[in-house]
Image: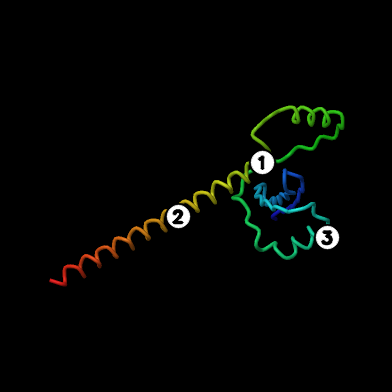
């Protein structure tokens, strides 16, 4: 049976408040970034999720390892401090967001290229038509 878990983290990323919506389906993490203006209230977040949950654009799924459960609080605290001191690539959510950003970037590039080529072809056809009209006059 599929195990699904959903989590929303809201934090301040200057100059806006940002929400990171994490969706875990069968050990695969996909993420969506939501930008708020001012600090959102709980009711506003809930209302936004109810209205716009269909329109959320999630990143491609990233495989994650199963987390082991540490029952010793002192060990957990030591590991947390160790992770906070490290300056790494980021969390799985950040990596998934980066992947989504790259995907949108490539889509935008292809659309822009096609549009530019279509415009170039259109200009060429106009020029050819103008040449034919000039030639017809004689």
In this rendering, would 117 be left or right of 98?
Answer: left
State the image coordinates of residue 52 (x, y, percent, origin top left): 70, 63
**Distance from Cα at disc 2 to Cα at disc 1:** 30 Å
Q: Nearer the viewer, mark 2 or mark 3?
A: 2
Q: Residues within 10 Å of mark 1 (few under 14, many from 20)?
A: some
Tell me the residue at 69%/55% (across/down): 2
Q: Is residue 6 above or below residue 98?
A: below
Q: Earlier in the sequence, mark 3 or mark 1?
A: 3
* Nearer to the camera, 84 or 36: 36
**Distance from Cα at disc 3 to Cα at disc 1:** 28 Å
Q: Nearer the viewer, mark 3 or mark 1?
A: 3
Element at badge 1?
Answer: helix
The residue that disc 2 covers is 112
Q: Identify the image quadrant of the C terminus.
A: bottom left
In this rendering, would 115 be left or right of 78?
Answer: left
- Residue 14 lies in quadrant: top right
Tell me the residue at 67%/47% (across/down): 27
In this rendering, would 113 be left or right of 20?
Answer: left
Q: How many marks?
A: 3
Q: Which numbered circle lies on residue 43? A: 3
């Amino acid at each position: 049976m599929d195990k699904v878990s959903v989590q929303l983290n809201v934090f301040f990323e200057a100059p806006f408040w940002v929400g990171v919506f994490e969706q875990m389906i069968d050990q695969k993490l996909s993420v969506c970034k939501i930008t708020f203006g001012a600090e959102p209230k709980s009711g506003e977040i809930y209302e936004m999720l109810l209205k716009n949950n269909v329109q959320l654009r999630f990143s491609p799924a990233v495989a994650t390892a199963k987390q082991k459960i540490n029952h010793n609080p002192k060990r957990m605290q030591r590991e947390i401090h160790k992770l906070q001191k490290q300056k790494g690539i980021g969390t799985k959510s950040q990596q998934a967001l980066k992947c989504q950003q790259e995907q949108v970037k490539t889509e935008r590039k292809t659309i822009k290229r096609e549009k530019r080529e279509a415009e170039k072809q259109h200009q060429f056809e106009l020029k050819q038509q103008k040449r034919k009209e000039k030639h017809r006059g004689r």
